Amino acid sequence: MLAAYITHSDCAKHEMGEQHPECPERTGAVNDMLLIKGLLDYMQHYDAPLATEAQLARAHSLAYVHELAAKVPRSGYTQIDPDTKINPHSYQAALRAAGAAVLATDLVLSGRAPVAFCNVRPPGHHAERAAAGGFCFFNNVAVGIRHALEVYGLERVALADFDVHHGNGSEDILFDEPRVLMCSTFETGIYPFCGAAPRGPNMINIGLPSRSGGAAFRDAVTAGWLPALEAFRPQLLFISAGFDGHREDDMGNLGLVEADFEWVTRQLVQVAARHAGGRIVSCLEGGYVMSPLARSAAAHVRVLIGAD
C-alpha cells in the first residue's frame, strides 16, 4: 500500500506580492525534490479537494469563514495583517489546503494509505478559530483533527508541531479539547510572541532560545514530547511540518539541519507505530528558502513513508 501524496495546482495561484517569503515556488520546490529523490515512486498522488463549509466550521466560526470569503478581491490584494494578503485565488487555495488535510484523514483512517503528506499552501497553524494571520487563513491540521474526532469518533489524536514559530492558531482551536494532545517546539522571542504559558493542560509548549541548535531541539522532544505522547497513546498523529528552523532559513534562528527533521520524524513514526497503527497525517507549514526547504521536506518524507 502506497503512502498518500496530496497537493493541487491551485496552491500555486495564491501569492502575496513580489518578494513575499510565503511564495508559490515553495510547493514546487518540495515536489521537485521528492521527484528527484525518487520518493514519489512510493506515493499515490491525490488532488486536494475543496474543504466544505461544514468541515471548516468544526475548527473555525462560520462568521469568520464568511467574513474571509467576502474579503476576496476581484483584482489585486486585500490586506489581512501586516504580513498576510488575499489575492483573487487565495481563498480557493486555502480551501484546497484544508481539504487536503480532510482527504488525508479519510485515506489514513479508512486504510487506503498508511500515512499521508500534504504538500499544500497557504500554511495553517497560525489561523485561529476566528482570525487569519501569519500567512495562514484556515488551520489545515485543526480541520483534519476535528474531522477525525467528529466523523470517525477517535478518542485520542496528537499533533506535533516543529515549525520555528509557535502554532498559536492550533493552540487557540484545540486548547480546550481533551481528546487532543498538542506538542510544540518553537523559537522564543519571534512571531507570534506567545506559547511560553500553555493555554490548556493538553498543550506541551517548549520554547527554545535563538541559536539553540539540534542538540537542544532533540533534548526538548525527548524530555517533553515523547513521555507525554507515550502516556496519551494517540490513535492518530498529525504533524505540522515546518522547516523554517533550518540554519539556512532566515525566518528563524534555531540552527537546525536536515538530520534534525529526519530524527524527529523517526521519533514520531515510532510513537505512531506503537499506538496508532502507524497512522500519520503530515501537513507542510513553514520553510521559506527553497533549497533547505526542499532538502528538509525530503528528509522528513523519506522517514515518514519508510523509504529510508
Image (spheres, helix red, strand yellow):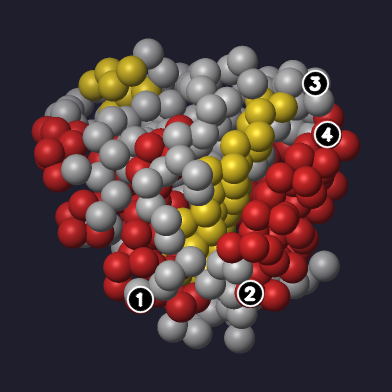
Q: Quadrant of residue 79?
A: top left
Give the residue type at disc 2.
His
Q: Quadrant of residue 178?
A: bottom left
110 displayed left or right of 70: right
Q: Residue at x 41, y 43 (%)?
A: 175
Give the residue type at disc 1.
Tyr
Q: Residues within 10 Å of mark 2 (few under 14, many from 20)?
A: some
Q: Any mark on residue 275, and which?
A: 2
Q: Residue at x 37, y 13 (%)?
A: 82
Looking at marks 2 and 3 on the same chain, the residue that comes earlier in the sequence is marked by: 3
Mark 1 or 2: the one toward you: 2
- Residue 122 seen by the camera: no
Is residue 113 shown above or below 255? below
Residue of label 4: 216
Cα distance in 3D space between marks 1 and 2: 17 Å
As helix, strand or loop, the secondary structure at mark 2 comes to helix
Q: Residue at x 34, y 36 (%)?
A: 128
Please state, as top left, top right, bottom left or bottom right, where the N terminus lies in the image. bottom right
Give the residue type at disc 3.
Arg
Residue of label 1: 152
Front in this rendered view, residue 306 or 186:
186
Q: Any mark on residue 211, and which?
A: 3
29 displayed left or right of 122: right
Give the residue type at disc 4.
Ala
Q: Any mark on residue 92, and which?
A: none
Looking at marks 1 and 2 on the same chain, the residue that comes earlier in the sequence is marked by: 1
Please state, as top left, top right, bottom left or bottom right, where the C terminus lies in the image. bottom right
Cα distance in 3D space between marks 3 and 1: 41 Å
Mark 3 or 4: the one toward you: 4
- Residue 193 seen by the camera: yes
Mark 3 or 1: the one toward you: 1
